[in-house]
Amino acid sequence: MAHSRRGVAALIVLLALAGAGAYFWLVPRRPIADLHRIAGQNVLLITIDTLRADALSCYGGPAQTPNLDRLARDGVRFDFAHAQAVLTLPSHTSILTGEYPFQHGVRDNTGFRLKAGTPTLATILKSHGLATGAFVSGFPLNARFGLDAGFDVYNDDFGETRGPADFLMASRTAGETLPPAIDWLKAQHGEWFEWIHLFDPHAPYQPPPPFDREYAAHPYYGEVAYVDAALGPLFDLLRQQSRPTLVIVTGDHGESLGDHGEATHGLFAYESTLRVPLIVAEIVPGEHEPSRGEVDEIGIRHVDLLPTVLDALGFTGPSGLPGRSFLAASERRSGAAPRDSYFEAMAPMLNRGWAPLEGVIVGHDKYIDLPEPELYNLGADPHEAHNLIDDAADAETRRTLTARLAEFHADLPGDRRTEDPDVVARLQSLGYVSGSAPRKARYTADDDPKRLIVLDQMLHQAVDLYERHQPQQAIAVYQQIVDKRPMSLAYQQLAFVQWETGDVDGAMATLKHAIQHGLTDAATQVQLATYLSESGQPGAALPMLESVARTSPDDVEGLNALGITYARLGRTKDAMASFERVLTIDPIDGMAVENLGSVYLSENRLTDAGEAFSRAVTMNPGSSRAHAGLGVVQLKTGHTADAVASWKQAVALDRTNYDALYNLAAELVREGNVPEARPYVEQFVKTAPPALYEPDLQAFSRWLSVH
């Protein structure tokens, strides 16, 4: 299909080679690192999660990255590029929409979804006839958050995560993401836009061999080197394509690695997490002339990427966007108007009740607006060691940047919609120990994240202890946290660990204590109500959940919990209505489909139940609960072998799915298959919480004593 494009700068001639069956693009020889408007070129956006600007070897970093270094030699490497947010979902939303977070409305990794109908790079390019494919590697970019709009293919298969102990289930490696991305690229015969997101440098840092040995002292850089090696075949393939490809590589944000006391990212917005690498190059088939590349220190922002891509293809974008193209050399060199950059970190306010952080960069001056504000000259102090906020010599700079920040008119986040328990668990497993904190009318110095960083360090310590199977030590740390500063997320995490270790009464007492301290957010109430319902007290849970449903009608976590409670009370019609309500809000909410299956199963509607669980498995092949429910249907319909296979799959996906584990062990015992049954029986006896499974534990213990 032919498409009209404006501003094509290069003359392109197509020649059919006899017998070759292919077309080659003839492009005039270019000046070093020049970027063109080329009609018909493909576009590849690669975002590498948690990538510090100073990690790559072409930036002088310790990770050896020859493939990205070569790309930089063939294009432009930007030395002063910045993200607009320091978390994955808000940052990627800015990249794809060209808007600041306060404009597109996605302010954190959970609780927000991009508004339907918002123009994105994918929707715009698809409207111009390009094929569009996305291959993402980390759960914060799951399709349910809205970034899948405009993509023909949105590949986000991560499996299932139930909590911090299942850390690695919430993401996949570059080696798992790139093969389907390359296969999709090979299948394209026309123009295409592909977005590839690689998650590997995110904590925990566990590079594969040989990078684990080569970077044993600094595994974060081993992850970066591994990603570079994995990208090599993709870049080689692009050099064999029949048309040029505009390639953009950037990080969504950086990683603190202990800078300013922050272990990872999300709290502060210092350069270690805000400044990102940015490499832009055109890979032109047949060009093998050695290049020196261009290094540019102009201040580039993530919001500039969408206008630049559209400019490169000769398209116009939505009006009113804050960014502008840097395709023209004049935009990248001295004399161009400065690009003031807004940035924010809202997770501390949303999750912990700490002060919100926002700021602005003007030239090389940086202002961070907090109860204890900060001002830095990044040219003279790139590590932000000297706060100039009280220096008389910098008073005018402070006034200028404060006024510039006010001109953005950036509103603080409003009410958020809490995600379903699966979302919360997955993000917790990635280290985003999230909760829901009420917004304060005024934040003081006591709310400044700088003063509270020790609590963040303790939260990371508690999660680490739980991951290393030391729950009692984790509980002790959480109790210290809530004693120092009551926070919903700390209470929720403490209750979660208590519940997982079988202390049902302790978990509920913790959440009741939080509510007594005024922490009455929906997430805390829903968690308490869920525990009440699951421990045989659905009547006590119901008023709390109905109240949440009235005040937060789009809270899918609350609606799922309400539906389960209705089902336990025998109110199946109300239960099904609640789950259907969830699916009107989020059509791909697999938990709601699984819950519908459970209701059908309770009514012995086996055909409907089987269809629901099969649908849930299709929606999320990594869902342990879906496989477990399907196994029950298969057993009841006489397909015992299939049931055993489904339960084995469920247990393999989630070792804490004790219902599936019990069913599997019990069926193998019933069949008299002692050798195969014994490991599952032993696993159940060893791990299932006694508070919920005491009679079953006793029965299996007696069986083990004679087998």
Image: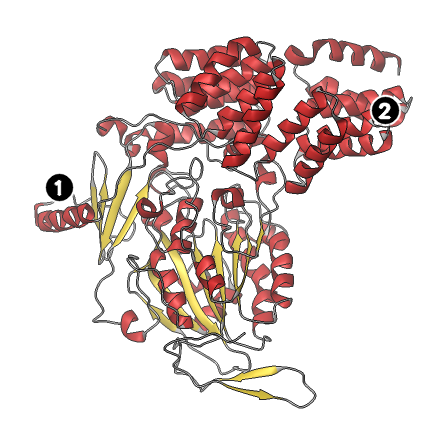
Is 95 left or right of 535, judged from the image as shown? left
Q: Give the mark toward the camera: 1 or 2.
A: 2
Please determine whether, in this image, residue 182 is positioned above or below residue 545: below
Q: Nearer the viewer, residue 503 or 604?
A: 604
Q: Is residue 218 visible?
A: no
Q: Which mark is residue 390?
A: 1
Position of residue 261 measured from the top left corner of the image (x, y, whole percent): 36, 37
Q: Residue at x 48, y 54 (%)?
A: 48
Instruction: Say what secondary structure mark 1 lies in.
Output: loop
- Tell whether 30 sits left or right of 668: left
Q: Is residue 488 above or below residue 244?
A: above
Residue that mark 2 sits on: 668
Residue 165 coordinates in the image, percent (x, y): 59, 31
Q: Quadrant of the N terminus?
A: bottom right
Q: Which of the colour schemes (rainbow, by chain, secondary structure, one colour) is used?
A: secondary structure
Amino acid beneath label 2: Leu
Q: Residues within 10 Å of mark 1 (few under 14, many from 20)?
A: few
Q: Residue at x 52, y 42 (%)?
A: 144
Precedes in sequence: disc 1 or disc 2:
1
Q: How dense is the environment of label 2, judged by Cα within 10 Å: few (below 14), some, or many (20 and up)?
A: some
User: Does any portion of residue 676 appear in the rendered image?
Assistant: yes
| Residue 272 point in image, percent of width and height | 36, 48
**Residue type at numbered disc 1:** Asp
The image shows residue 607 at horizontal and vertical percentages of 76, 31
